Image: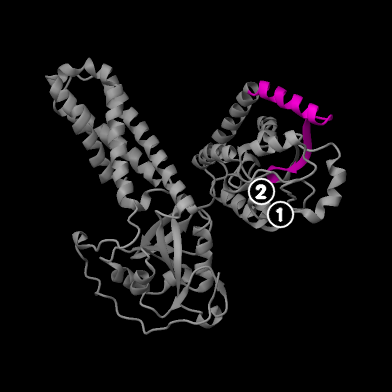
């Protein structure tokens, strides 16, 4: 942390040009953050190899259709050279290699899927136009679908590796200069640094207002004022400018800044005052040259919710049947460790404030509640939670069950009965408060076995951060988001992050 003691204030300089469009071929080479170049090269190789592998796997089926090509040489040229190159060209045209969509969010995969559909349409049109009737539709379809699946798997592997490099080495990221008032910039700083895998690294703050109020405040990065923005970006080695909050609303300023950055190789992003609202709920509606951001209501009902409930019940029923041997083994281990009930039942607050009794494997000694009063002073968390990393009330087998999250599996019973969901906010004890204010909004959906808080740190999070994540989930829920959280849960459970 740094103290803002003084500013180097200079008269603002005029933009380097007057906004006349420059040729895309004349853009300056990016001085910093060139990680995307080798990364894109790797993606090109992976995608090419994925198409070749899919064609090779389908070659037996293709072999029945070689007559449509006239000779084997032409067939192999098309299958293992021209078709993979066509995939790369179409993916490039769909901006599946655009660095702004790589490494974060679903846009990269959406563009790959759109590219796959375009490839299928193109192949179908060419086959129809050239009257290549000897081709096997099943073999071609298998090759195209297989290539799409392998490309997506390759992208997932590449993204996982990129996130690993960003978290452990602090490299392959975008160095950002934040522009706005200090509170707005600090809010954006907190948001973009929550997830190191996103690769957004703020390196400086440039104040547009509130210089006097900022003096003496602690800041995580250096603070400047009255500087030429482009010169400051080059000085601190940045490659991205983030205009925060009210700074984006100043008439003409944002447009002139965009003009100044033309040809510089520096990206410009705008962080409006819409915190914790996911992209699918925000739509741009231009009216007479004014881009209006329309924020839709959260989707908490309708067909998608019915599908979620059906998926929960089916998955819970199958899970309980398949896990019977594991349940028996855990029950025996618990009874050997500490005689007493196998399951722990506790009242929790559920959907719309209804109370239910949650099912969990018991991980504490039978006298845990009586010993709680003597441990209150050792609480290591805040808010409505009580957590101790080395809780003496937990017996050894219970520690393993907590670390591996096996103690949560009996909650599949609550899911089957409709009291919980596979994914949702954490179910809190019924005697911990009245759930007033923002916390009560969590009750609009069913609590879940796993949730956004679990894949974001679990017990390592503060109470305020846990509430923020739960509210974000409620406001931005979707089936795709649920599937993403379930996928991330697997990795979190394996590394046992924040489980105690």
Q: Nearer the viewer, residue 414 or 345?
A: 345
Residue at the spot 86% in from the left edge and 39% down from the top edge: 367
Q: Residues within 10 Å of mark 2 (few under 14, many from 20)?
A: many
Q: Nearer the viewer, residue 24 or 5?
A: 5
Residue 24 is left or right of residue 243, and the answer is left
* Residue that badge 1 annotates: 381
Q: Nearer the viewer, residue 125 or 394?
A: 394
Residue 305 is left or right of residue 115, and the answer is right
Q: Residues within 10 Å of mark 1 (few under 14, many from 20)?
A: some
Question: Which sits earlier in the primary sequence, circle 2 or circle 1?
Answer: 1
Indicate whether residue 497 is drawn in magenta: no
Q: Position of residue 85 (x, y in %)?
A: 22, 37
Residue at the spot 41% in from the left edge and 56% down from the top edge: 173
Task: Tell me, yes or no, whether the two marked residues, 2 and 1, touch with CB atoms within 8 Å.
Answer: yes
Helix, strand or loop at label 1? It is loop
Residue at the spot 32% in from the left edge and 31% down from the top edge: 147
Helix, strand or loop at label 2? It is helix
Indicate whether residue 344 is drawn in magenta: yes
Which span is picked out in magenta?
Answer: 323-352
Q: Position of residue 101 (x, y in %)?
A: 37, 50
Which disc number belongs to residue 320?
Answer: none
For the residues marked 2 and 1, what is the alpha-carbon distance in whole angstroms?
A: 8 Å
Q: Residue furthest top?
A: 64
Q: Residue furthest left?
A: 70
Residue at the spot 67% in from the left edge and 47% down from the top edge: 443
Quadrant of residue 377 within the rendered picture: bottom right
* Residue that badge 2 annotates: 459
């Amino acid at each position: 942390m740094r103290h803002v003691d003084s500013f180097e204030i200079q008269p603002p300089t005029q933009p380097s040009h007057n906004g006349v469009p420059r040729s895309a071929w004349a853009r300056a080479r990016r001085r910093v953050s060139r990680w995307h170049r080798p990364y894109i090269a790797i993606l090109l190789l992976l995608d090419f190899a994925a198409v070749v592998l899919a064609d090779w796997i389908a070659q037996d089926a293709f072999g029945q259709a070689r007559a449509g090509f006239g000779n084997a040489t032409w067939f192999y040229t098309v299958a293992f050279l021209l078709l993979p190159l066509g995939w790369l060209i179409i993916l490039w045209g769909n901006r599946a290699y655009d660095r702004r969509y790589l490494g974060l969010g679903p846009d990269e995969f959406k563009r790959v899927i759109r590219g796959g559909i375009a490839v299928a349409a193109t192949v179908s049109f060419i086959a129809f136009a050239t009257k290549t009737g000897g081709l096997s539709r099943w073999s071609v379809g298998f090759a195209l679908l297989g290539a799409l699946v392998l490309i997506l798997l390759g992208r997932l592997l590449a993204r996982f590796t990129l996130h690993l490099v960003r978290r452990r080495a602090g490299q392959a990221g975008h160095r950002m200069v934040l522009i706005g008032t200090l509170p707005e910039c600090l809010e954006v700083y907190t948001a973009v640094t929550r997830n190191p895998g996103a690769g957004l690294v703020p390196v400086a703050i440039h104040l547009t207002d509130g210089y006097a109020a900022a003096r003496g405040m602690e800041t995580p990065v250096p603070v400047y004022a009255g500087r030429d923005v482009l010169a400051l970006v080059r000085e601190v080695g940045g490659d991205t400018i983030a205009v925060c909050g009210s700074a984006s609303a100043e008439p003409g300023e944002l447009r002139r800044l965009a003009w100044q950055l033309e040809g510089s190789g520096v990206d410009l992003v705008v962080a409006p005052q819409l915190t914790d609202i996911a992209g699918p709920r925000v739509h741009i509606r231009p009216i007479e040259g004014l881009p209006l951001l329309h924020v839709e209501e959260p989707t908490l009902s309708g067909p998608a919710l019915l599908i979620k409930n059906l998926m929960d019940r089916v998955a819970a029923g199958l899970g309980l049947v398949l896990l019977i041997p594991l349940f028996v083994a855990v029950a025996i281990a618990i009874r050997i460790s500490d005689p007493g009930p196998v399951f722990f039942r506790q009242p929790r607050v559920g959907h719309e404030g209804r109370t239910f009794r949650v099912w969990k494997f018991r991980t504490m000694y039978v006298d845990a509640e009586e010993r709680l009063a003597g441990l209150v002073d050792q609480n290591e968390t805040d808010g409505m939670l009580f957590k101790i990393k080395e809780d003496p009330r937990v017996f050894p087998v219970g520690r393993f069950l907590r670390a591996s999250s096996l103690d949560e599996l009996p909650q599949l019973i609550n899911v089957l009965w409709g009291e919980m969901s596979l994914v949702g906010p954490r179910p809190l004890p019924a005697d911990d408060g009245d759930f007033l204010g923002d916390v009560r909004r969590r009750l609009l959906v069913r609590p879940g076995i796993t949730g956004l808080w679990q894949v974001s740190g679990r017990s390592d999070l503060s109470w305020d951060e846990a509430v923020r994540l739960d509210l974000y989930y409620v406001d931005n829920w979707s089936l795709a988001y649920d599937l993403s959280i379930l996928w991330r849960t697997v990795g979190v459970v394996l590394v046992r992050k924040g489980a105690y």
